[in-house]
């Protein structure tokens, strides 16, 4: 125990618990608090964890202590004095931290985390005083005579039951006045008792009251979403209330419900003076697990524990001396009767009821669990911290409560984490099989090692075929064979009574295994911050966690399709429905998914006037796909035989009219299911189509009640149908075919060119599957049929390399002129040999590119309408540029030197980095099925928010998206573009861009990458994207995005609708003259539909590949007003752009000659307010805006 940590009453109570005696509340008063040192000696320090002077006392749970500990570890000084060298003991402690934890810094982070996830001792005294009052009150409750269950429930609801059985109670008002108590309904489980029931319910004061659960053992951790601490109080029902046969037909649960309702009636009575709000809560919606929740109202009394943000949960338990024998709760026993014939009711099913029996066994487990946890905590010092880490990890992934969705079966799953650790520490009970290996005990591990060992167990063990039994002193209560086939998974605790995985779907366990494996991959990796990823980040976001998410409305479920036996077995209709749903979906999806999870809202407290919980009407189904198998078109079933086998009948019953007999190429004839799709986008919907079919066939849920996000995302990457109907060919494969055809044509012309062509390499996103829209061909005759707002033709960039020759000139400017001569010759030869082909030489020099840099390209339009832009790569340019940079001539001005430096950067980017980048990205597309789609969605998103191209280059987006696929374990790789997109958005939200990111982009596709330098002095971009070939990480982010733009990325409020409120000015453009307007994410189809036949009336329209006047306009504005404003624009058809003034020039500045911005004198009003000198000037915003409008004449909409 750390120095200065006070021992509370729960720690002292361990002495009592170690003797296996229940702790009574009245015994707590004799326990005193003593400050102890780590070895148990009295300490003079009076501070405690959570006190006002404790640095880790932080209300919101932030890691305040982490900062302090890390600064100390790094050798910071206090008061100007250096720290003393570490002692031998401290050095040994650091070495032990490195051996027993991931690293010494990881241990510091864990040590800083733990105090912030535990309750503060300073706020416990009011709770302790209230528990005393509650104990005294419950111990004085009057009895209720035996009555018929329905009559007793009616009397309790009417308020006459207790008034007839109660006299003056301690703490009640003498005059009998006061506000009326709540109406209390008995939460009888369905089926409720009937009028012909021959048994009775009654009430007597509890035979024992004890604090149980994690609170008494001080192993509670902070719940997610600000949920309150839960203090479990076990109320032991006297054995005289029960009979031996009460295990049958819900009789025990009905008596338990009545007992709980009587307590609720008393506690909610204002005469009790407890001043608490009382409500019911049923975990997993199972009324058999109904408990009572007490929340104190704020009244500033000594017992007011509302500041602790805690609730008290009252749990009725079964005494060990109960007449109900445990052997009656074997998984093979049938403990309720369901009539085979609903009308006669003469015959009954005799099917085992393992889930019913498991819930019945839970009634006596709370006290046993307290003793077990206490023993482990005393025997294993690391157990306490390991359990805390495991619970935090589980809470961050939805395996518990919270206000957000939780994974089916894991609500209230605290015993699972306790038992998992207990299994590792105590070891596994011998299986009794030949050559069967049992898990050994592990008692000498640190908390981190125990935590990691549990994850390893969860990730590797096959729970569906291998049951686990924690070693028990008395051996197994039931043989392993009795569990076989009764539960989907088996993990029995050390009492040999409770299967903690009872009721947990196997699909949910597979999700748990996947999360455990993903966490181990993070811990074993070398990149990023594993501590934050494992313990701090909230992983419950559905979009970034699952490849497919479906929202299902259950209000239309055909209730008659769920059998009465399943409803009784699961405790509610919703429980039976979700269990059946999980089993059916897992069977249908098979190897297509790595994990399947059903998610729903956690159980919420309900008023005492509502006896039964409300069934959930909406759930989510999350799928984690296997990218190699998820999108197959055919599901093969069992061989077709005559007569039909049992396997065939089961297959046909599962699929219904989708099942058909097919013969395959290998000669086999099998039952099969074929999914017919038109394109690759529809093929990605096959898993969703399977879910929709199963829901409709087996549960009566129509397709209108099942919603997926995929169709909406598909629309973002498609051009309007009214435009695409004009195109003849489109698609990435068609573009690659056109490229290969053009390359072959050029190589065949070697004899007609001055030099032979050595290579033609693609460098365009259209040829690596990452352009936002699939490339299309627009022949000349098609252009004239399109409206001016839909005539854009994308240029596909290529690099042309000639064979080496000594005839090239040694002057950089002359080399550029020589390239233009080559282009002229190539254009003539191509036009002569390919009818219908058009080629022209274009130059980019007027846009500010230095004359020494490559600035010419050959634009080729093929007869089929594909447009390409060729640049010539000549390696001699790099030598000449490096020679000038290394030994600049004395006559070279600084401006010319900067031009040479810029020319060298452009050369490296265009001819060295771009081809290599293209090959790496293309390889990633073929390696990961979702990579290309992820890049396209992210580009579309950034363009919609006016960031793509001007601020974030396309290559930078591709490198950033690659971080989601390479450098991470297989469990973390997205299999759909929607999940990949969500992961990138989350990265942008959480990424500390000042540290940069390292992406192994090339991988094994190109061994031995050539490293090039991308460091540029004075670079404005803040993103650092390092790869193997670019260790500086500045190749694609030299000038953008800057810090202001980065903040804009992180604070985006909408998905694809960009807010305009934060801009200083917004300029509207005329959509009818924008060739790319049809690509706008919110394009108005009326712009090109209502124009009628205007396009055909204008005659033949010239094809202008790559021409976008809005793009050129924004380039000019960006260059001219680089020191005045920052511009933002959607390059994909945006019809408006925004600007933000440079804040350094919006305030008064001294007048200077040749100011770099348009200015005007400060007005008198501004002068009086600011007190500036009368010679000051400010930005002339009106003049700049007028000039912007003038420059955009014809484009800007006035």
Image (tube, rainbow, N blue to C red):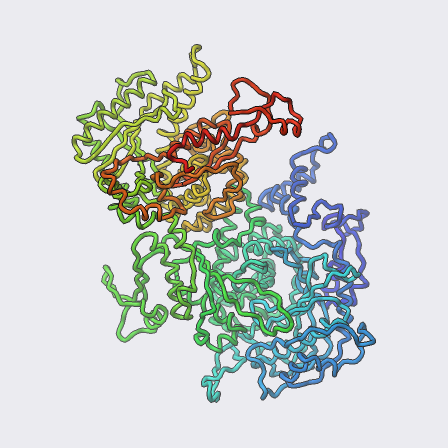
Which residue is most to the top? 890
Q: On the rendered structure, is 6 left or right of 785?
A: right
Name which quarter of the figure residue 648 lies in.
bottom left
At x 31% / y 60%, what residue is drawn?
A: 675
x and y, in percent, of residue 478 in the image: 55, 73
Task: Decide: is 501 above or below 1092.
Answer: below
x and y, in percent, of residue 983 in the image: 47, 47
Which residue is most to the right? 174
Q: Is residue 15 visible?
A: yes
Q: Is residue 526 visible?
A: no
- Nearer to the camera, 1174 or 136: 1174
Task: Decide: is 667 above or below 713.
Answer: below
Q: On the rendered structure, is 744 left or right of 1052?
A: left
Task: Decide: is 75 above or below 400.
Answer: above
- Nearer to the camera, 637 or 289: 289
Name which quarter of the figure residue 162 lies in.
bottom right
x and y, in percent, of residue 937 in the image: 41, 46
């Amino acid at each position: 125990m750390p120095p200065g940590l006070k021992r509370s009453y729960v720690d002292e109570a361990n002495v009592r618990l170690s003797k296996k005696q229940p702790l009574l509340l009245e015994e707590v008063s004799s326990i005193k608090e003593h400050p102890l040192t780590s070895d148990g000696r009295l300490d003079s320090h009076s501070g405690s964890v959570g006190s006002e002077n404790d640095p880790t006392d932080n209300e919101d749970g932030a890691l305040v202590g982490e900062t302090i500990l890390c600064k100390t570890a790094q050798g910071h000084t206090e008061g100007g004095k250096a720290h003393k060298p570490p002692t031998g003991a401290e050095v040994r402690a650091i070495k032990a931290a490195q051996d027993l934890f991931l690293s010494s810094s990881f241990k510091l982070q864990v040590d800083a985390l733990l105090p912030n996830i535990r309750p503060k001792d300073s706020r416990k005294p009011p709770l302790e005083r209230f528990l005393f009052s509650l104990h005294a009150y419950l111990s004085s409750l009057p009895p209720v005579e035996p009555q018929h269950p329905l009559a007793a429930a009616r009397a309790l609801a009417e308020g006459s039951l207790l008034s007839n059985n109660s006299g003056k109670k301690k703490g009640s008002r003498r005059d009998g006045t006061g506000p009326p108590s709540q109406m209390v309904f008995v939460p009888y489980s369905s089926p409720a008792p009937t009028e012909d029931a021959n048994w009775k319910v009654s009430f007597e004061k509890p035979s024992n009251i004890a604090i149980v659960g994690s609170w008494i053992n001080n192993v509670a951790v902070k719940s997610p979403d600000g949920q309150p601490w839960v203090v479990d109080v076990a109320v032991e029902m006297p054995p005289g209330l029960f009979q031996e046969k009460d295990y049958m037909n819900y009789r025990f649960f009905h008596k338990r419900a009545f007992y709980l309702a009587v307590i609720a009636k008393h506690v909610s009575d204002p005469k009790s003076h407890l001043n608490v709000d009382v409500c019911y809560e049923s975990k997993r919606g199972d009324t058999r697990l109904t408990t009572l929740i007490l929340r104190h109202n704020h009244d500033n009394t000594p017992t007011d524990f509302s500041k602790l943000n805690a609730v008290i949960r009252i749990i009725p338990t079964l005494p060990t001396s109960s007449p109900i024998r445990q052997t009656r709760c074997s998984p093979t026993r049938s403990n309720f009767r369901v009539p085979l014939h609903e009308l006669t009711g003469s015959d009954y099913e005799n099917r085992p009821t393992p889930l019913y029996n498991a819930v019945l066994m839970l009634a006596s487990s709370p006290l046993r669990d307290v003793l077990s946890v206490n023993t482990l905590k005393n025997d294993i010092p690391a157990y306490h911290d390991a359990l805390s880490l495991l619970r935090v990890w589980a809470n961050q992934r939805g395996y518990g409560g919270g206000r957000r969705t939780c994974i089916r079966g894991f609500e209230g799953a605290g015993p699972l984490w306790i038992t998992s650790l207990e299994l590792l520490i105590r070891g596994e009970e011998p299986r009794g099989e030949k050559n069967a290996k049992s898990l050994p005990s592990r008692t000498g591990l640190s908390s981190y090692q125990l935590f990691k060992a549990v994850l390893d167990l969860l990730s590797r063990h096959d729970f569906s075929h291998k049951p686990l039994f924690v070693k028990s002193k008395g051996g197994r209560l039931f043989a392993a064979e009795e569990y076989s086939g009764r539960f989907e998974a088996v993990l029995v605790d050390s009492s040999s009574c409770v299967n903690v995985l009872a009721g947990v779907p196997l699909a949910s366990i597979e999700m748990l295994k996947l999360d455990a494996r993903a966490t181990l991959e993070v811990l074993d990796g070398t990149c990023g911050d594993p501590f934050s990823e494992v313990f701090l980040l909230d992983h419950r976001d559905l979009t970034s966690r699952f490849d497919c998410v479906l929202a299902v409305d259950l209000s239309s479920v055909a209730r008659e399709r769920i059998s009465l036996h399943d409803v009784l077995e699961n405790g509610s209709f919703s429980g039976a429905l979700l269990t059946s749903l999980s089993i059916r979906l897992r069977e249908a999806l098979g190897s297509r998914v790595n994990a399947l999870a059903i998610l729903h809202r956690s159980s919420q407290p309900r008023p005492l006037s509502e006896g039964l919980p409300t069934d959930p009407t909406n759930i989510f189904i999350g799928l984690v796909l296997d990218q190699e198998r998820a999108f197959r078109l055919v599901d093969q079933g069992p061989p077709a035989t005559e007569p039909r086998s049992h396997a065939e009948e089961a297959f046909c019953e599962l699929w219904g009219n989708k099942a058909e007999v097919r013969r395959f190429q290998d000669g086999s004839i099998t039952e099969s299911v074929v999914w017919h799709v038109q394109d690759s986008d529809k093929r990605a919907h096959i898993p969703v189509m399977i879910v929709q079919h199963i829901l409709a066939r087996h549960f009566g849920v129509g397709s209108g009640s099942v919603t997926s996000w995929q169709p909406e995302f598909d629309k973002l990457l498609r051009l309007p149908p009214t435009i695409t109907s004009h195109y003849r060919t489109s698609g990435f494969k068609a573009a690659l075919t056109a490229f290969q055809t053009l390359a072959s044509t050029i190589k065949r012309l070697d004899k007609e060119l001055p030099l032979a062509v050595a290579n033609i390499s693609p460098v365009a996103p259209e040829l690596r599957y990452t352009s936002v829209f699939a490339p299309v061909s627009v022949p000349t005759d098609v252009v004239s049929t399109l409206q001016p707002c839909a005539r854009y033709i994308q240029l596909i960039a290529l690099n042309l390399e000639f064979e080496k020759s000594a005839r090239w000139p040694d002057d950089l400017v002359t080399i550029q002129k020589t390239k233009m001569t080559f282009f002229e010759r190539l254009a003539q030869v191509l036009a002569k040999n390919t009818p219908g082909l058009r080629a022209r030489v274009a130059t980019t020099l007027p846009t500010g590119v230095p004359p020494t840099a490559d600035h010419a390209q050959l634009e080729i339009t093929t007869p089929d309408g594909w447009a390409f832009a060729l640049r010539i790569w000549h390696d001699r340019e790099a030598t000449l540029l490096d020679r000038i940079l290394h030994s600049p001539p004395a006559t070279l001005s600084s401006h010319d030197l900067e031009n040479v430096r810029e020319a060298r950067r452009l050369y490296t980017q265009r001819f060295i980095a771009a081809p290599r980048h293209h090959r790496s990205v293309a390889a990633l597309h073929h390696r990961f099925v979702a990579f290309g789609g992820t890049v396209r969605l992210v580009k579309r998103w950034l363009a919609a928010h006016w960031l793509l191209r001007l601020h974030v280059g396309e290559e930078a987006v591709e490198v950033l998206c690659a971080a989601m696929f390479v450098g991470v374990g297989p469990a973390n790789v997205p299999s759909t573009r929607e999940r990949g997109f969500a992961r990138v958005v989350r990265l942008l939200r959480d990424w500390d861009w000042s540290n940069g990111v390292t992406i192994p982009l090339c991988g094994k596709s190109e061994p031995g990458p050539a490293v090039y330098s991308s460091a540029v002095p004075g670079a404005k971009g803040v993103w650092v994207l390092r790869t193997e070939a670019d260790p500086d990480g500045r190749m694609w982010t030299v000038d953008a995005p800057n810090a202001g733009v980065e903040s804009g990325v992180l604070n985006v409020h909408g998905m694809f609708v960009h807010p305009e409120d934060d801009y200083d000015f917004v300029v509207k453009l005329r959509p009818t003259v924008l060739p790319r307007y049809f690509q706008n994410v919110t394009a108005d189809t009326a712009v090109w539909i209502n124009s009628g036949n205007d396009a055909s009336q204008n005659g033949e329209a010239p094809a202008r590949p790559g021409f976008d006047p809005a793009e050129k306009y924004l380039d000019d504005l960006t260059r001219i007003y680089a020191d005045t404003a920052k511009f933002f624009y959607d390059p994909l058809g945006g019809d408006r752009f925004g600007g933000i003034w440079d804040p350094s020039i919006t305030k008064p500045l001294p007048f200077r000659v040749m100011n770099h911005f348009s200015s005007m004198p400060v007005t008198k009003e501004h002068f009086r307010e600011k007190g500036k000198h009368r010679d000051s000037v400010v930005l002339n915003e009106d003049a700049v805006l007028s000039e912007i409008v003038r420059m955009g004449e014809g484009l800007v909409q006035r």
